Image (cartoon, helix red, strand yellow):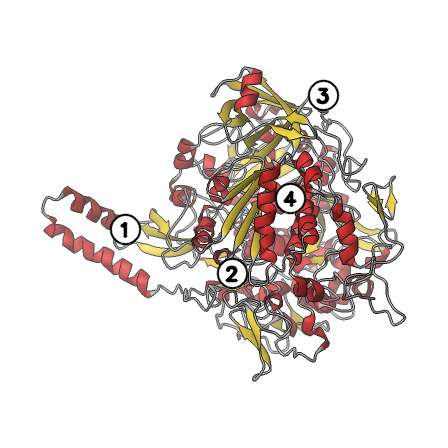
Amino acid sequence: MTNHWNDIQFSDCMLVIGGNPAENHPISMKYVTKAKKNGGKLITVDPRFTRTAAVSDIYAPMRSGTDIAFIGGLINYVLENKLYHDEYVRKYTNASFIISEDYDFEDGIFTGYDEDSRSYEKSTWVFERDEEGNIVKDESLSHPRTVYQMMKKHFSRYDVETVCSVTGTPKEDYLKVAETFCGTGAKEKTGTIMYAMGTTQHTVGSQNIRAYGMLQLLLGNVGRAGGGVNALRGECNVQGSTDFGLLFHLMPGYIGAPTQSERHQSLDAYNENETPAAGFWSNKPKFLASYLKAQYGKNATKANDFGYDFFPKGRRNYSHISLFESMYDGEIKGMLIWGQNPMVGGANVRKVRAALQKLDWLVAMDLWETETAAFWKEKAGSNPAEVQTEVFMLPAAGPFEKEGSVTNSGRWMQYRWKAIDPKNDSRSDSWFAHNLAIRLQKLYANDNSEIAKPFKAMDWSFGDSDYPDMDLVNREINGYDLNTGRTVNHFADLKDDGTTSSGNWIYAGFYPDAAPGEEKNYAKRRDDKDTGMENYLNWSYAWPANRRILYNRASADLNGKPWSSDKEGIWYDKAAETWTGYDVPDFGVATSPSDPGWENPFIMLPDGKGGLFAAGMAEGPFPEHYEPYESPVPNAFSSVQLNPAVKIWGGDMNQKGEAADFPIVATTYRLTEHWQSGSMTRNLEWPSEIMPHMFVELSEELAKEKGIKEKDKVVISSARGEIEAFAMVTKRFKPYSVRGQKVHHVGMPWHYGYEGIATGSIANYLTPHIGDANTMIPEYKAFLCDVRRA
Amino acid sequence: MIEVTRRQFLKLSGATAATLAVIELGFDPKKAQAASKELKIAESKVTPTICPYCSVGCGILVHVKNDDVVYTEGDPDHPINRSTLCSKGNSVRQLFTSDRRVKKPMYRAPGSNTWEEKDWDWTLDRIAEKIKETRDKTFVTHDDGMPVNRTEAIANLGGAALENEECYLIVKLMRSLGLTNIEHQARI
């Protein structure tokens, strides 16, 4: 989230799209309700009339997989009707920048496309520069190649008629959404977009979010109370686990993991090629050197590039889909799993199971016997005698049987204290990691080979107890001034000369200025007094730098005053010559009106301006609608059907379904009573009792066509497989009219599996291995199926 | 140490006071019922935690008495949820009281159709040996003249349900071992 949960109450309009907070983030609705009491409007855009829709002022149905068409239409509506926040757009975004003459777009394809590699060469996606290298601008926005004009041209194709024919939204509903949400372009108003996996789990997932970001920049809604682009994250620490780099392409703090390439062949090469000249990331070498110092301790010296060579260099994409594809191909021999359950949560589960069967060994640590730990059993559809995998199932301690912090969606790093000893013979995941590290150190103790070196270089100093000392872990994450032994106050204190360490620079400062033995963990703070605008600056700690709303410089106008008096964030105190306010400024506090950066609120970007045009994306600098991998209709916007930059996975067990055989659009969703792959709820009596069965939700019209009655057992089939579920016939799905054709839409929860108290079919037997072009997140939310009575 | 706020302190002393008041209750069944609810958590040790489910990050108080979790409730001082919880958050006590938890390290041998109970010592040794064996067989120190120090034959999955410190330790260990296949829920 750019903002945080309590902040939603300040919104004039909440657009929920690709999320369902009433059912999946129930407590967040307190703040939605509060905003509504203050006159704010709630809009839900979703394929299904969810419980969030039920309490909304406006509901607009939208066929799954058509967000860019929907939002593209709103962008067009804003531009055509001049509803944008004029000063904000002119000064805080790159609307006035002039795009290179070499850039173009035609029939769904941007310049630089290579069909063979299905990727873009992006050298034309740039701005015109003058002789001194400065970006050429036209603040009148009238030059035909300004971002503003090019964006206007691009989205002029997203007229209401075309958009509604693609999304299947009734025109009057669409216009209500457009009028209401785009009204937040008024300078004193803010609107927020609340989204979740309904947005991301598409072949165009990243561009969906980018489209949201663009709309919010145009309306002047970023950096302000009641505004923002807000991901409603689904797991208690998925924010933290991402921050800490449990992803192939990242090191902690979003520093890109080095790869086997010329660009990264040494620390110098990495720093030279990955450090922008301006913007906050120009400090990257300091964060990286400090991270390597934390990783390798005394074995990281200036002479050995702080151990940069020890760090593994990958040679390709190892994302979740790729990982299971290479396991299926026999390249991965062993796997450790910590509280994850890919036999339920992975896409294309039939292939996941076949991949697991090829492992030599599997370690699964969890509170429960998960479907993944039991993949070799008959009930999983395996023949145990034929599965040669050694499986270790380890009992994990529960969340209040250990201590440590979790970071919520609003980036609040909150501490959990230990309430009781671990149940049975269970241990915390940190205990297991710690003891495994120590056993491995013993195994390698007398091994002086080249292979042993990178592992032996690791610094592992977390005390002599059986459990790692959490306080030492926290100090290491925060970082030290290695000369004084005190913890650093701020990431600005980090250096690239080896005199500081920090395990995760974005968290530097949560444990500030502490001498050895002095405890100062701000994740433990519990002062619940409102410090203004419900930012609760003394409750826990929010990264970065305890900032609660990102880009908050944009909450103030060109004079440094808040755009509106009831949405104050930070402001410039002329007398004191400093930025101050209800939040920690996301800006140099001493930046004065005469400083060149005064009008540059987006300090993480080299030019400080919100990117309406951005070259960072795989499939183009502007979002463009493409149909899902499996779609019932041809693309109305161009002759390019599928996102031209996605990787197409061939091979066995990943068949593509065609509309002739599988005419129904399917999506998956979550229920209030269950959570993720279900292990943490289907093993508990209460949630199992109130939501006991797997079902498929379908419209009355489809049920009638198929002769299906409520509670009938039905078979749902896709090109990858078939599952059984009970029919739940509701008015919440309606047939869509898409490009003149009737299209049925169904949905089903993905929580169920064969372990636990409440069991049922695994929805992900149906989903394909195809992912977003930027992130490779699987397209769970739009695939084709058919249904019939069992 | 945990800072127990004034409100929590009052709440706890209130619960203790209820044990005395119960004598004077007479025969009003409603009052008796309300008091017995208080009794259950009387003198329990209260520890704040954060809900393990979605990412709203609600505060929960865990009441422990006689080595058992006797009660859990929404944390009244937590600025986000102020006591309220959803149906999942309200079920967290069962995470401890459930008899379905994995009790011991379990091992399944190749081709076997059953789990065997093992102790931690054996389990740790065996897993460490497996990791070393796979790593050593597949480790690549250089590729195309460049130091790459990796193994592509071991994968590490998970983390979104763990704590930051745990994520940090796991990443540290796995990167030092040379893993490139590191993924978790955030990707899917």
Q: CA distance from mark 2 to mark 3?
A: 57 Å
Q: Which residue is mark 2?
A: A470
- Rendered residue at 54%/15% (across/down): A707
Observer-side mark, 4 or 3, equals 3
Q: Which residue is mark 4?
A: A200
- Mark 4 lies on a secondary structure that is helix
Residue A444 image point, x, y percent: 68, 53
Q: Which class describes the residues within 10 Å of circle 4: few (<14), some (14-19), or many (20+)?
A: many
Which of the labelled discs sits on residue A548, or is there none?
none
Residue A16 image point, x, y percent: 55, 46
Q: Is residue A407 left or right of residue B84?
A: right
The three-letter code of the residue at mark 2 reads Met
Judging depth in this view, the residue of A430 and A254 nearest the camera is A254
Dot 2: chain letter: A
Q: Is residue A676 above or below residue A151?
A: above
- Rendered residue at 52%/32% (across/down): B116
- Mark 3 lies on a secondary structure that is loop
Q: Is residue A107 left or right of residue A239?
A: right
Which of the labelled discs sits on residue B41, or is there none?
1
Rendered image quadrant of residue A176: top right
Which of the labelled discs sits on residue A660, or is there none?
3
Dot 1: chain letter: B
Rendered image quadrant of residue A99: bottom right
Q: Going by the picture, which residue comes out furthest to the bottom?
A: A575
- Rendered residue at 73%/27% (across/down): A656
The three-letter code of the residue at mark 3 reads Ala
Observer-side mark, 2 or 1, equals 1
Observer-side mark, 1 or 3, equals 3
Observer-side mark, 2 or 4, equals 4
